[in-house]
Amino acid sequence: MKALILAAGRGERMRPLTDRVPKPLLSVGGKPLIVWHLERLAGIGVREVVINTSWLADQFEPALGDGRQWRLTLSYSYEGPEPLETGGGMLRALDLLGHEAPFIAVNGDVWSDFDPALLPRQPTGEAHLVLVDNPAHNPEGDFSLDGTGVLSIDGPNRMTFAGIGVYRPSLLADWNTVIGAPDSAVEARPRFPLAPILRHAMRTGAVTGEHHRGQWTDVGTPQRLAELDASLSR
């Protein structure tokens, strides 16, 4: 199984730290955020990882190399000077991930003790997402998880998407129709978010999920970065 680490964002809320270093390369607990992901993915037998890049893209390969130190093969999906958002970035990376088999995708700017070995290798629908209890910065949550493991948009007890999941490439097959982009407007590097695609799939019950009750941090501010670093360093 292959994996994608989403690492192209500008990291505006992390400035000035991200003026010189891309957010996934910021260190916590003695190593870059992205290395935590690479180690966990390698630990469950993933051997090929694609990293999408844009902002300060030239820093990733010197920092991570070709992945052999983790027994991985790393490929880089460069999106150009402007990131293509989560949906556009994932669509572009399919040329490296493949257009048939499901793949793991992880946001490069989160940290969690979630074990990716728990993820299904063959999701029953188009995607399977990990949810966590709502943090203070997202009190309303994102999606609702019912007793059968199916996600919905408006159900009770909404939780927060952890930025960890398994996806089928077919989720993106009709992306332009879902977001209302006519064929004539589709560019070579389309830029669009993933959330509308997921919500569309949820309307037909095609997205499942699970609740992770362990540790998780969206490293979205310098304060959260410092708190996580102190916790891991202890």
Image (cartoon, rainbow, N blue to C red):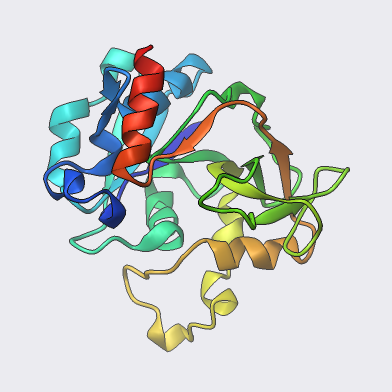
Q: Is residue 220 left or right of residue 125?
A: left
Between 215 and 65, the one lying in front of the other is 215
Is residue 109 among the parts visible in the rendering? yes
Q: Residue at x 56, y 42 (%)?
A: 162
Q: Position of residue 200 (x, y in %)?
A: 67, 68
Q: Quadrant of residue 110?
A: top left
Q: Quadrant of residue 212?
A: top right
Q: Where does the C terminus fall, quadrant-wise?
A: top left
**In the displayed structure, would residue 151 be above or below residue 122?**
below
In the image: residue 207, left or right of residue 105: right
Above or below: residue 61 compared with residue 152: above
User: How many circles with numbers are drawn on the protein?
Assistant: 0
User: Which residue is painted at 69% across and 55% down in the image?
Assistant: 143
Q: Position of residue 104 (x, y in %)?
A: 53, 37
Q: Nearer the viewer, residue 34 or 179?
A: 34
Residue 111 percent location from the top left of the image: 44, 31
Q: Residue at x 34, y 14 (%)?
A: 233
- Relative to 233, is 166 on the left or the right? right
Residue sticking out furthest to the right: 147
Judge whether residue 101 can be spotted in this image: no
Decide which of 91, 207 is in the foreground and name it.
207
Along the viewing direction, whichever of 99 and 93 lies nearer the viewer: 93
Point out residue 146 in the picture as x, y percentages from the top left corner: 84, 48
